[in-house]
Image (spheres, grey):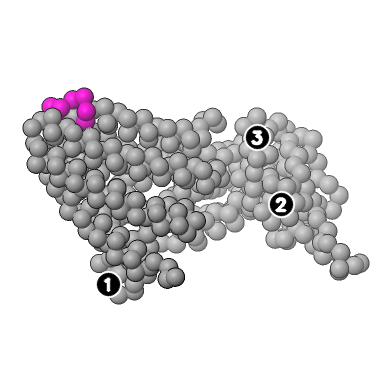
Amino acid sequence: MDLMNDRQQGLDYALPNDENPAEPPRLWAIHLVFPDARTAEYLVAGLPLAARLVRALAEKAHGAPISAGVAAGVWTPSQRCLDECRRLSGESPLRLGKDAAPERDAFVVDAGEELVNLVRKVREELGERAPSLRVGTFSQAASLDRTLREANRLLLLATAKSQDGLFSRTFNRPISRSITRFLIRFAWIEPLHATAGTALIAVAMLAALLGLPAHGAVIGAVLFQAASIFDGVDGEIARATFRTSPAGARLDSLIDAATNLAFVAGLSANLWLRGDTSASAAGVAGLALLMAGLLQIGRRAQRQGEPINFEAVKVHLRRKPTRRWLVDILIWLTMRDFIAFTAALLAVIGRVIWVPYIFLGFAVCWFAAITVILARTAPRS
């Protein structure tokens, strides 16, 4: 059966009115056809394929009605699929399942071809980070299953952030992505749940540092590394399922900052309880410098009416084209992912007392850089 018509290849479904070009464009209805119900409900990076393709079409539909059905069998959409399709359909009226017959003169869009186009677009955005994929057609069942699996893998890879540090890319992200792959199978999981998970790990870390003087430093450092890994999950879920929000980003940044401060403060307290007063004092001094630098950033942001930006130093330094490689190395060495791993490694091998001194050295450099950069970039009256 030929499921396509002569308008299938159109990429923009808002067509001009030929009779009166001055009038708003006429919106043609779109009908999305899946091979069967299983394909429509298949979870691709945490979303039913139907919901993911409805969103892709809604971005190009300019409010035109969208319907979706299957070529073989009967499709009664699950509640999860219905909820996600409604959430992602934007301003487009939506009809799904057995009652969603295509409107007269509607664009008929093949779901397989639409998914292949989406996968290719994401792969181009990933560039060199994209694995070698074999994006095929949907002419055979084997090709269909392979393409769905490859789409799931590729879209999860795309949830990483471009500003990830070197250690995060090679170690933290593969682990956090595996956790995300498991969690997004459940319809009730949202980014907020993962953010709460990071906060709970941070609470357990602080409890270990303060409540277990003998072994708390090792346990706390390992939990700090666990929090650093798990911290990536909420963002991955949000980006994979289109649930990013400014409020969620602010909450995530707040918990990150609180976790970092809690580790340094808790480790300093743990060392003091163990009698390592010099190391404890180094940790407190580094903590004071860190907070002083953050206070400077916060005051600048408040005066300019902008959100607090803890990445000010990195952004400024990366504007300098000279010795970019050296700047990148210095930034990677001072990022939380590397510091958390280093702290955990030193704790496990019995050298946790080095951590406060290393942190103090980084804090001195960071505070000096913050002070100089903010002074140079201060708005002139």
Which circle, 1 or 2, is nearer the viewer? 1
> In this rendering, would 221 be left or right of 113?
left
Which circle, 1 or 3, is nearer the viewer? 1
Residue 209, x across and y down, in percent: 21, 30
Q: Quadrant of residue 117?
A: bottom right
| Residue shown at 22% from the left, 58% from the top | 365
**Residue 103's mark?**
none
Label 3 sits on a secondary structure element that is helix
Q: Which residue is mark 1?
A: 323
> In this rendering, would 269 be left or right of 104?
left
Q: Which residue is mark 3?
A: 83
| Residue shown at 53% from the left, 39% from the top | 46
Observer-nearest of 83 and 280:
280
Label 1 sits on a secondary structure element that is loop
Do we see residue 318 in this rendering? no
Please name the amino acid that badge 1 sits on.
Arg
Comes first in the chain, label 1 or label 3: 3
Q: Which residue is mark 2?
A: 109
Vertical placement of residue 124 versus 97, above or below = below
Please name the amino acid that badge 3 sits on.
Asp
> In this rendering, would 103 be left or right of 241?
right
Q: Which residues are magenta?
A: 209-215
